[in-house]
């Protein structure tokens, strides 16, 4: 469990440095997607250690969420 916490902490630090953008692009490179599906794919790719909130995607894409339908 300690190792899992350490990995989760390292992911958190990486996310603050912009790693979220890379993960989103990796998911979108595979196929077109939408916020919830991207979030689930990132959760899978991080072995369940990180489930990014959808608000992080809007910040990365620089699109206000109310403009997405």
Image (cartoon, rainbow, N blue to C red):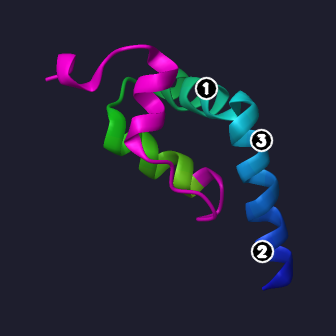
Q: CA distance from mark 2 to mark 1?
A: 23 Å
Q: Tell me the quarter of the picture where residue 46 sits.
A: bottom right
Residue 26 point in image, percent of width and height: 60, 28
Q: Secondary structure at mark 1?
A: helix
Badge 3 or badge 1: first in the primary sequence = 3
Q: Secondary structure at mark 3?
A: helix
The residue pinned by badge 1 equals: 21
Q: CA distance from mark 3 to mark 1?
A: 11 Å
Q: Is residue 16 above or below residue 50?
A: above
Q: Residue at x 84, y 82 (%)?
A: 2
Badge 2 or badge 1: first in the primary sequence = 2
Q: Is residue 65 magenta?
A: yes
Q: Residue at x 59, y 57 (%)?
A: 50
Q: Secondary structure at mark 2?
A: helix
For this rendering, which residue is in front, 45 or 66?
Answer: 66
Badge 2 or badge 3: first in the primary sequence = 2
Residue at the far left: name it.
69
Span colored in magenta = 45-69
Residue 7 point in image, percent of width and height: 81, 63
Q: Quadrant of the N terminus?
A: bottom right
The residue pinned by badge 2 equals: 4
- Tell me if label 3 and label 1 are in contact, CB under 8 Å: no
Q: Residue at x 45, y 30 (%)?
A: 57
Q: Quadrant of the C terminus?
A: top left
The residue pinned by badge 3 equals: 14
Q: Residues within 10 Å of mark 2 (few under 14, many from 20)?
A: few
Q: Is residue 45 above or below residue 16?
A: below
Residue 14 point in image, percent of width and height: 77, 41
């Amino acid at each position: 469990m300690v190792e899992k916490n350490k990995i989760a902490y390292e992911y958190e630090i990486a996310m603050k440095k912009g790693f979220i953008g890379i993960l989103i692009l990796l998911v979108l490179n595979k196929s077109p997607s939408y916020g919830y599906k991207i979030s689930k794919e990132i959760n899978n790719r991080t072995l369940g250690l990180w489930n990014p909130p959808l608000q992080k995607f809007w910040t990365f894409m620089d699109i206000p969420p109310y403009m997405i339908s």
